[in-house]
Image: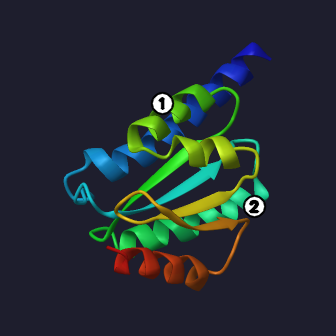
Amino acid sequence: MKLERFLGVLISSFIVFSGLWGTAASAEDATPAQAAMIVLIFDTHCKTACELVRPIMKEIKDEMKDCFSYVELNSSSETLADSQKTAKELGIHGFLADYAQFVPIVGVFTAKKKCIKVIQGPKAKDVYMAALQKALQCK
């Protein structure tokens, strides 16, 4: 039982940090500091709904990687402290605090870190794209 929990925490941590590495640490995915941002809050225990949203977000990220930053924050109790630290560093800690219980949640932010759209639950790709396009137009 302890091994299963340890593996769950390890996998959760990898998922959170792999999303962050793909966004900020990789030269090919790097975006300007003042870029729009999409934030996905998920929970490792949320299987059905979260697993519907994540592939859509990956597809959008792959299509428009030079236009915005993408961050995944895990709200599972095992990794919440790390996600809170990341959210604070990004200037979106209030968003995580407000929505961590309602996964999956996608927040679309302007370059000035203003949340212009909160999307709860799985939606069609065009819903996320429309919100992102609006964020990219904001100055």
Density class for disc 2 (Cα within 10 Å; few <14, some 14-19, many ≥20) is some
Q: Quadrant location of residue 17?
A: top left
Q: Are marks 2 and 1 in contact (CB under 8 Å)?
A: no
Q: Position of residue 37 (x, y in %)?
A: 41, 61
Which residue is at a point 36% across and 60% down the rendered structure image?
A: 112
Q: Earlier in the sequence, mark 2 or mark 1?
A: 2
Density class for disc 1 (Cα within 10 Å; few <14, some 14-19, many ≥20) is few
Which residue is at a point 52% across and 83% down the rendered structure image?
A: 130
Residue receiving disc 1 = 85
Query: Is the residue 65 above or below the residue 13 in the image?
Result: below
Q: CA distance from mark 2 to mark 1?
A: 25 Å
Q: Position of residue 90 (x, y in %)?
A: 40, 44
Is 48 on the left-hand or right-hand side of 96? right
Q: Quadrant location of residue 61?
A: bottom left
Label total for image = 2
Screen quadrant of the N terminus? top right
Q: Position of residue 53 (x, y in %)?
A: 64, 65
Which residue is at a point 69% across and 49% down the rendered structure image?
A: 99
Query: Is the residue 92 above or below the residue 125 in the image?
Result: above
Residue receiving disc 2 = 49
Q: Quadrant location of residue 79?
A: top right
Screen quadrant of the C terminus? bottom left
Q: Nearer the viewer, mark 2 or mark 1?
A: 1
Query: Is the residue 69 above or below the residue 60 in the image?
Result: above
Choose between 77 and 8: the one closer to the eye: 77
Is 94 on the left-hand or right-hand side of 6? left
Q: Position of residue 107 (x, y in %)?
A: 56, 61
Name the element at disc 1: helix
The amino acid on which the numbered mark 2 sits, given as a three-letter code, is Ala
The amino acid on which the numbered mark 1 sits, given as a three-letter code, is Lys
Choose between 82 and 110: the one closer to the eye: 110
